[in-house]
Amino acid sequence: DAKTTQPTSMDCAEGRAANLPCNHSTISGNEYVYWYRQIHSQGPQYIIHGLKNNETNEMASLIITEDRKSSTLILPHATLRDTAVYYCIVRVDWSGGSNYKLTFGKGTLLTVNP
Amino acid sequence: DAGVIQSPRHEVTEMGQEVTLRCKPISGHDYLFWYRQTMMRGLELLIYFNNNVPIDDSGMPEDRFSAKMPNASFSTLKIQPSEPRDSAVYFCASSPDSATNEKLFFGSGTQLSVL
């Protein structure tokens, strides 16, 4: 799976949009971009994933550049409860039972300040 | 659904003792994963199962670690004998078998301390 590069930490003011970047310059055509987050003392939580189109759900939006070498996770109105480590992961397409690995890097610690 | 259930929540044991961690996946999920998390190494995949069959155990650190999944609703991760360097948070996760629903659902983890 392609490697990702994320900033170690970021700060955001409560109520503002949080934009978390991720570089994945070696991504392959069949690799998806996934975002998970881990709130302190909890297990990781799925946020969103996409292949090449921008995606939005109730938690966040995912913007993938046209060349797919980078992406941005957007939390439109960050709250204190969004303080967590955010992981950007790229992995190959689900392939019927094989190669079903999700490899976590170091992630970005997002701190939402009051 | 109650989500992925892990037990115990915390485990403190002495070096050399056997430790068994337990996991109940979400009903209907075909995949089960065991991860370990430490400050130094982050989240590491140890092993995963598909329909109760181990698919990839390349992340299991050594023979002291073993994992089983006797049925679709239960899995164990055993460490025998335990060592202080095994101290970590162990997470279990499950996922449905679907090309359009590749989410992993994690449990709350077991905090293991080996003294």
Image (tube, coloured by chain):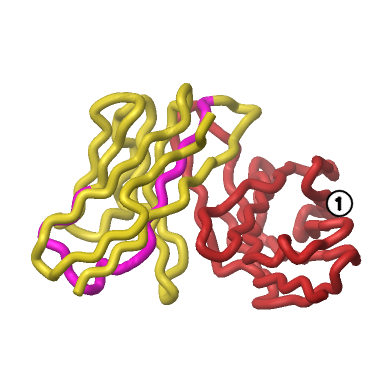
Q: Is residue A90 left or right of residue B75?
A: right
Query: x, y percentage for residue B63?
Result: 15, 55
Q: Amino acid at mark 1?
A: Glu
**On the image, which quarter does residue A24 sit in?**
bottom right
Query: x, y percentage for residue B107?
Result: 46, 46
The red one among the chains is A
Query: x, y percentage for residue B40?
Result: 42, 76
Q: Name above or below for residue A56 compared with residue A95.
A: below
Give the total number of marks visible in the rendering: 1
Binning the other alpha carbons within 10 Å of mark 1 as few (below 14), some (14 to 19) or many (20 upward) gives few
The residue at the point 82 percent across, 62 percent down is A78
Q: Name above or below for residue A90 compared with residue B103.
A: below
Q: Name above or below for residue B41 compared with residue B34.
A: below
Q: What color was chain B assigned in the picture? A: yellow
The residue at the point 13 percent across, 70 percent down is B15
Mark 1: secondary structure = loop
Residue B80 vs residue A69, the one in the foreground? B80
Bounds of the magenta segment: B78-97
Q: Is residue B32 left or right of residue A87?
A: left
The residue at the point 28 percent across, 25 percent down is B71
Q: Residue furthest top?
A: B28
Q: Circle 1 is placed at which residue position?
A: A66
In the rendered image, residue B90 lying in the magenta stretch gets the answer yes
